[in-house]
Image (spheres, helix red, strand yellow):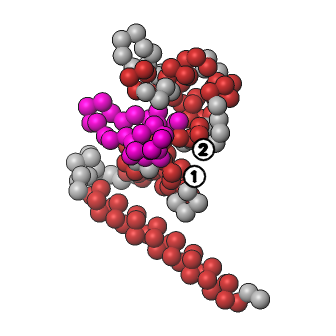
């Protein structure tokens, strides 16, 4: 069977439908396959009945939804992600922005994506805490255009740090016996 971009068996997110939102089921199914986790094992780990999981995670989206079909509750979604050891922020990033589930287990990129998830988990609260120390601001000072500038600065800094680490490693390996 040939895999197509966005199919339930590929490592890519299905095409984005802004009206419907993104489908996280392909990510969950990919993680289950990659970790060799069956519905029975997932049921045991989550406490969700195997038959319900089968319905919620069915490979055919039309069999998952529709009249009389169950919709996954947020608590079920979080239990499933936890059982598969997937950070909810990582799931959102993989499905909503990157669209490539293979990064979940990529030796080259998994650590940097996990580091960015950890950084962004605390970032909003850290910024708010710092702004609380300033007098005379009311929120109108913030400009939406800053997002692009800040994003580029973060990318540049991460690349600089990774490059510096690689350079240090290369230098150390030059001196090894």
User: What span is colored magenta in the figure?
Assistant: 1-29
Q: Decide: is 2 above or below 69.
A: below
Q: Position of residue 172 (x, y in %)?
A: 67, 84
Q: Decide: is 20 above or below 129.
A: above
Quick check: is 30 in the magenta stretch?
no
Query: What residue is at 52 percent from the left and 60 percent from the top?
Result: 109
Q: Position of residue 146 (x, y in %)?
A: 27, 58
Q: Quadrant of residue 35?
A: top right
Q: Are marks 2 and 1 in contact (CB under 8 Å)?
A: yes
Q: Which mark is residue 34?
A: 2
Q: Is residue 45 visible?
A: no
Which element carries disc 2, helix, strand or loop? helix
Quick check: is 3 in the magenta stretch?
yes
Which of the two labelled residues, at mark 2 and mark 1, occupies the earlier sequence position?
A: 2
Which element carries disc 1, helix, strand or loop? helix
Q: Decide: is 122 above or below 160.
A: above
Q: Position of residue 110 (x, y in %)?
A: 55, 56
Query: What residue is at 57 percent from the left and 30 percent from the top?
Result: 80
Mark 2 vs mark 1, CA separation in Å = 8 Å
Q: Is residue 170 visible?
A: yes
Q: Which residue is mark 1?
A: 105
Query: Does residue 115 appear left or right of residue 123 in this picture?
Result: right
Query: What residue is at 65 percent from the left and 35 percent from the top?
Result: 37
Main SS category, magenta section? loop
């Amino acid at each position: 069977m040939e895999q197509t971009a966005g199919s339930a068996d590929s490592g890519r997110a299905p095409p984005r439908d802004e009206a419907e939102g993104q489908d996280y089921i392909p990510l969950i199914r990919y993680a289950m396959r990659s970790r060799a986790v069956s519905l029975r094992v997932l049921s045991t780990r989550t406490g969700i009945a195997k038959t319900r999981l089968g319905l919620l995670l069915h490979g055919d989206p039309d069999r998952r939804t529709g009249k009389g079909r169950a919709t996954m509750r947020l608590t079920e979604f979080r239990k499933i992600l936890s059982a598969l050891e997937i950070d909810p922020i990582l799931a959102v990033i993989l499905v909503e922005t990157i669209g490539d589930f293979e990064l979940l287990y990529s030796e080259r990129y998994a650590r940097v994506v996990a580091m960015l998830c950890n950084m962004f988990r605390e970032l909003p609260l850290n910024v708010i805490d710092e702004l609380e120390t300033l007098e005379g601001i009311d929120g109108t000072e913030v400009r939406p255009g800053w997002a692009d500038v800040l994003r580029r600065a973060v990318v540049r800094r991460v690349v600089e740090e990774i490059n510096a680490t690689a350079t240090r490693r290369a230098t150390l390996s030059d001196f090894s016996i």
